[in-house]
Image (tube, helix red, strand yellow):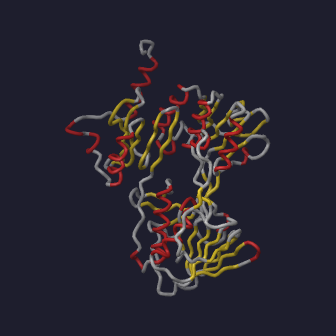
Amino acid sequence: MTETRGTDGTLRHIAVVGTSLAGVRAAEALRRRGFRDRLTLIGPDTDFPPYDRPPPSQAVLTGGDVDGARLTVAPDLDAELLLDTTAEGLDLDGTSPGTGGTLRLSAGRTLDFDGLVIATGAGARQPAPLKGGHPDVFVLRTFEDSIALRAALLRGPRVAVVGAGFVGCAVASHCRSLGLDVTVVESGPGPLGQVLGPAMGQELVALHRDHGTAVKTGASVAALHPDGVELTDGSRVSADVVVVAVGRAPRTEWLRGSGLDIADGVLLDATCAAAGASRVVAAGDVARWFNPLFGAVMRVGRRSDTVEQAAAAAETLLADGENAPPFESVPYFRSEQYGTTIQFVGRGNGVPYIVAGTLAERQFVAAYTDGQHITGALCVNRPSQLIRFRRMVAARAPTDLVLAPEGGQVSPLEEDLAAYEAAAASPQTV
């Protein structure tokens, strides 16, 4: 990754593009860390502070509080606000170190800056085959999206959920609680496979099917029809409502031609500085950064991570030379599905082992390891264990600390899973 280039005393105007949670918190952090010169916030909102509307939750679908709350903003922010304004292009001045650039804004305006914070967030992905052609296709990104879907589900439709990530699985679970016919369509081998790995993804297939949800894996949607969706394997799923939950698309279209690496988000180094640029940082859903804790490029997940990354980005922008500290974060996901609490910390790309409980009871802890360190942990109906394993992941605890306590032995998840599946298939099993 590229090294951070600090300021040399000429940082006089910082522009923050995006009045998202990340953008507002970055602006506050800049002021809190002593920046007293010109600060401009640019965003499509028509008023400020904007409403704080995180991704829709299961609570919204099930009738929880749907009122948006305004972000609290520091009273001494003292920023120039360009509201109802979008960024349409970025020109970086690469002629000499420490120079800034120019933003091209809507209505033909331009804005010069010395430092830039990119915080334009992300929108719901909607693949081409899922656009148009069906009267009831829903994506979930805002509270309004969830409210509209909730109203549609109350009409008792057949539902197809495209994507078996945390949002898709939660939607499917809620639909079954309403007594609806639900089919989940997932291109991978099982639900949450990209987060938990294929073995645990397969285990969660059984959780869905045990509760009456049909699951189609290894297939994608090829086309929409008035009576449902056609899959790439040639089969069809009957549906009156289609819910698209295939992840988030970073809002980076305006950065094309800027010279920044924007493949699936703005690429950052460990300090949240944009790769290959000077005095440009990013935070939130629009960014993917090198997390030194795992030695990998990844995204923030939780709201608290977004706030912390925004502060780290601000510190990097104001830092002198190589003094900017790296930003480390432990990913965390939580979901309630069919009365089952699923919590995960870390990364699921290592080998998982069952270290507490059993798969058969669906009350267990699976620890993931890269062979040397604990890299992640899945807690299913074991909430009391989460903090302990999160600390292990954050501390890069050695594998032996969990897998061989006091000389004991623990079987790999794949072996435990095979034994469980064999027992479940046996006619003697009750």
In depth, the one of 128 and 108 nearer the eye is: 108
Quarter of the picture holding the C terminus: top left
Please tell me how many numbered marks the rendered image carries: 0
* Closest to the observer, 47 or 228: 47
Residue 337 relative to residue 351: left or right? right
Residue at 65 percent of width and 45 percent of height: 146
Q: Report whether 371 appears left or right of 60.
A: left
- Horizontal arrangement in the rendering, residue 7 relative to residue 399 (left or right): right
Question: Where's residue 289, x and y in %?
Answer: 49, 62
Q: Is residue 63 above or below residue 430?
A: below
Residue 381: quadrant of the picture: top left
Measuring 59% from the left and 56% from the top, which residue is drawn there? Answer: 69
Let me know if residue 274 appears in the view.
no
In the rendered image, the vertical position of residue 91 relative to residue 176, given as above or below? below
Q: Nearer the viewer, residue 39 or 365?
A: 39
Residue drawn at the location 66% of the way across and 43% of the way down:
244
Outermost residue, top direction? Answer: 428
Q: Position of residue 104 (x, y in %)?
A: 69, 75
Residue 277: x %, y % from top left: 54, 75
Residue 406 location (% of width, % of height): 20, 38
**Along the line of sight, which residue is nearer the eye, 184 or 159?**
159
Q: Is residue 196 visible?
A: yes
